[in-house]
Image: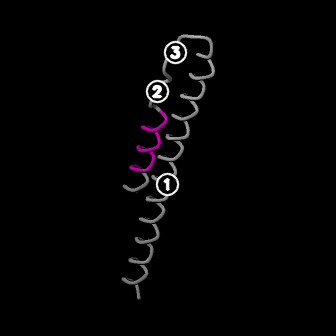
Amino acid sequence: MKRIFIFILLLSWAWSMPANAQIFTGPDSARRAQKAADKQQKAQIKQQRKAMKKYQKAQRKATKQRARQHS
């Protein structure tokens, strides 16, 4: 239960982070701002995947440990 709470907390923290796209001036500012926003979004997705993998690994480890205790 504690692990699930931490996982949900991590996800909510990642979702609440503002997308800090830089404000550019000049002829191609919209394109550069969009590229910066895309880069930030990819970084957030990568962070979420990493947190998910860590959570799943902890769950597998806990399951193995419980199985050993009941054997």
Q: Quadrant of residue 13?
A: top left
Q: Nearer the viewer, mark 3 or mark 1?
A: 3
Upstream in sequence: badge 3 or badge 2 = 2
Q: Earlier in the sequence, mark 2 or mark 1?
A: 2
Q: Quadrant of the N terminus?
A: bottom left
Q: Amino acid at mark 1?
A: Met
Q: As drawn, is 32 to the left or to the right of 14?
A: right
3D distance between C-alphas at marks 3 and 1: 34 Å
Residue 25, position in %: x, y? 53, 11
For the residue carrying disc 3, how many other residues have a C-alpha within 10 Å: few (<14), some (14-19), or many (20+)? few
Quadrant placement of the C terminus: bottom left
52 vs 40: above or below = below
Sequence-first tag of 3 and 1: 3
The tag on residue 52 is 1
Which secondary structure lies at badge 3? loop
Q: Residue at x 58, y 32 (%)?
A: 38
Q: Which residue shows up at 49% across the image and 35% down it?
A: 15
Q: Report how far apart the C-alphas of labels 2 and 1 lie in the structure.
A: 20 Å
Q: Is residue 64 magenta?
A: no
* Distance between the alpha carbons at the discs numbered 3 and 2: 18 Å
Circle 2 residue: 18
Q: Residue at label 3?
A: 24
Residue 60's x, y, as percent? Answer: 46, 70
Segment tinted magenta in the rendering: 5-15
Q: Residue type at mark 2? A: Pro
